[in-house]
Image: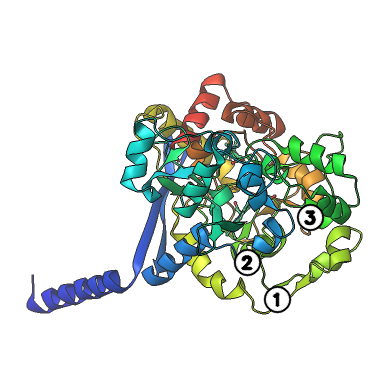
């Protein structure tokens, strides 16, 4: 090697090293091969590289896991869920929420937050998992994923709030079912959000907001079921689908969103837009939020009536946190399926079909597996009803980013979980697009979907 080239190489290496030391670099590389009649006609490599500031990512992780944005004003001051958790014996109302009850409604416990004596005591069977006082102790250690307790100096719990991790994290069950290390970005498909809200002794507030009676509120919350939530309810008041069934959408993955334009099943806005929406309007944190589309009283009667399209709070506990929250979400790469969890040969054949005969890649483009650009399609185009699409300002469905599908197999597929299995999704596309896939080809496509 010539000396000048060597110097160049050292220079390039130094640039890389200095980059590595001040930024966190994530690279996703995907090679797309287009095969027609067994002949490779095109191979190209798509690379997505993100440079994230590690300090901002770390800050965002704290916010995602522990920040309530002041939403105690809703969950405690209005819904009194702190009192529901405490139970009558501890100064609240009702039976209280024991760890056993908490786990049964899908709440998860972060084993890494537990002190070793407590871990030993649980393992020795010395901890009463049927006593709400144990839940309060877990909250004191910040160990209940997504729920944050506030305590006074004498250790009494005086409020609870929720954070993003409630719905968008789960645990790896490494300690026991429902107890383990946090997995941020994984949707908690066990979480019964409606069941938790139903613990309130103030359904009147929700009934008044939605202009229905309290039994209706209770029935709707009961009807969502595990892993689902109706995010549109508090802006449009629509609780039922056209068939009279209680409407709710699956909690989606919050990982694998790098390079994805519009977020949510119906593309309400980008990820940053939606973060502000959900922190203000769903969690009821204290922030600022602007969206004049919500002033449309025909489509969004509840939002228009309550001026949800122009929220302001002083101090604003949400907006200053949006950059860090975004950085953390972008750092959440989709999990990679374990080798052996799918048939690799079938997946390779499935990949060729995905990019070729089945034409899935015309919308689900690697490496994001959603469209590049305006990633929305009409209901007609994908062959389903437009009920949920029409509830969004876009009127369309967003192409779901497919990475890490294997880690969210519970609850079904498509926004409302209408297809129970990936096989059913493929059958739907096969019929709708007249793909004429053979049984083997369908199996191969399923194997590919499990591999991405
Ligand atoms: C009560 C459960 C719940 C909480 C808490 C929650 N989310 Fe969500 N999130 C959902 C549901 C359900 C959707 C799907 C909404 C839809 O499309 O109908 C969603 C959608 C999203 C999406 C879009 C994902 C995609 O595929 O485009 C992002 C991003 C997101 N949430 C981030 C957050 C952040 C950040 C927080 C905290 C500020 C948060 N969420 C709090 C339930 C929740
Ligand atoms: C015209 C664009 C388009 C094409 C072509 C397309 N999809 Fe989709 N796909 C979508 C949209 C939009 C959704 C979201 C539907 C919903 O949530 O209701 C989706 C959802 C999915 C889901 C569900 C993901 C989840 O987490 O719920 C899977 C799996 C999927 N597509 C696989 C495929 C496969 C396999 C093909 C090829 C046979 C394909 N798609 C072709 C647009 C498309």
Compare residues 182 and 451 and report the one nearer the observer: 182
Distance, label 2 to label 3, CA atoms, is 19 Å
Q: Does dot 2 land on a helix, a strand or a loop?
A: loop
Q: Earlier in the sequence, mark 1 or mark 3?
A: 3
Q: Position of residue 273 (x, y in %)?
A: 65, 66
- The answer to which image quadrant residue 149 occupies is bottom right
Work out whether 323 lies above or below 416.
below
Q: Mark 3 points at which residue?
A: 234
Q: Which of the two labelled residues, at mark 2 and mark 3, occupies the earlier sequence position? A: 2
Q: Which residue is drawn at 65% across and 61% down?
A: 72
Residue at figure coordinates x 51%, y 41% from the top left: 355
Mark-to-mark CA distance, 1 and 3 = 19 Å
Residue tagged 2: 70
Residue that label 1 marks:
313
Q: Nearer the viewer, mark 1 or mark 3?
A: 1
**Labelled pair 1, 3 in contact (Cβ < 8 Å):** no
In the image, is 237 to the left or to the right of 431? right
Q: How crowded is mark 3: few (under 14 residues within 10 Å), some or many (20 or more)?
A: some
Labels 2 & 3 near each other (Cβ < 8 A) = no
Which is more toward the observer, 209 or 116?
116
User: Residue 323, percent across and down?
Assistant: 52, 72
> Where in the figure is residue 401, as x and y percent of width and height?
56, 48
Give the answer, above or below, for where 421 lies relative to 246: above
Q: Residue 405: x, y in percent? A: 51, 40
Q: How crowded is mark 2: few (under 14 residues within 10 Å), some or many (20 or more)?
A: many
């Amino acid at each position: 090697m010539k000396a000048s080239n060597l110097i160049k190489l050292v220079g390039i290496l130094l640039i890389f090293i200095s980059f590595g030391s001040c930024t966190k670099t994530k690279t996703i590389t995907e090679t797309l091969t287009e095969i027609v009649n067994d002949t490779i006609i095109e191979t190209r490599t798509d690379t997505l590289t993100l440079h994230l500031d590690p300090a901002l990512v770390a800050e965002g992780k704290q916010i995602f896991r522990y920040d309530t944005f002041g939403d105690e004003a809703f969950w405690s001051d209005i819904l009194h869920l702190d009192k529901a958790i405490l139970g009558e014996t501890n100064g609240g109302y009702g039976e209280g929420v024991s760890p056993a009850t908490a786990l049964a409604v899908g709440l998860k416990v972060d084993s890494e937050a537990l002190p070793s004596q407590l871990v030993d005591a649980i393992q020795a069977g010395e901890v009463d998992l049927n006593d709400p006082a144990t839940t309060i102790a877990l909250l004191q250690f910040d160990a209940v994923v997504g729920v944050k307790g506030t305590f006074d100096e004498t250790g009494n719990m005086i409020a609870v709030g929720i954070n993003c991790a409630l719905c968008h994290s789960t645990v790896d069950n490494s300690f026991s079912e429902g107890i383990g290390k946090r997995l941020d970005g994984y949707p908690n498909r066990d979480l019964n959000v409606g069941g938790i809200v139903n613990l309130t002794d103030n359904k009147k507030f929700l009934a008044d907001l939605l202009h229905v009676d309290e039994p209706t509120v209770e029935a709707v919350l009961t009807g969502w079921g595990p892993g689902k939530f109706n995010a549109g309810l508090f802006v449009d008041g629509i609780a039922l689908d056209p068939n009279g069934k209680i409407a709710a959408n699956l909690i989606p993955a919050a990982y694998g969103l790098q390079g994805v334009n519009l977020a949510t099943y119906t593309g309400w806005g980008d990820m940053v837009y939606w973060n502000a929406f959900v922190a203000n309007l769903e969690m009821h944190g204290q922030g600022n939020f602007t969206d004049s589309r919500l002033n449309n009283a025909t489509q969004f009667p509840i939002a228009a009536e309550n001026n949800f399209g122009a929220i302001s709070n002083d101090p604003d506990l949400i907006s200053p946190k949006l950059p860090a929250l975004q950085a953390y979400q972008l750092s959440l790469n989709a999990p990679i399926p374990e080798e052996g969890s799918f048939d690799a040969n079938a997946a390779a054949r499935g990949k060729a079909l995905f990019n070729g005969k089945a034409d899935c890649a015309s919308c689900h483009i690697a490496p994001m597996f959603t469209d590049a650009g305006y990633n929305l399609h009409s209901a007609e185009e994908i062959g389903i009803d437009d009920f949920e699409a029409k509830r969004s300002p876009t009127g369309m469905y967003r192409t779901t980013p497919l990475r890490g599908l294997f880690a969210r197999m519970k609850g079904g597929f498509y926004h409302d979980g209408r297809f129970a299995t990936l096989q059913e999704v493929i059958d739907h596309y096969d019929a709708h697009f007249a793909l004429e896939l053979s049984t083997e080809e369908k199996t191969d496509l399923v194997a590919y979907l499990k591999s991405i």
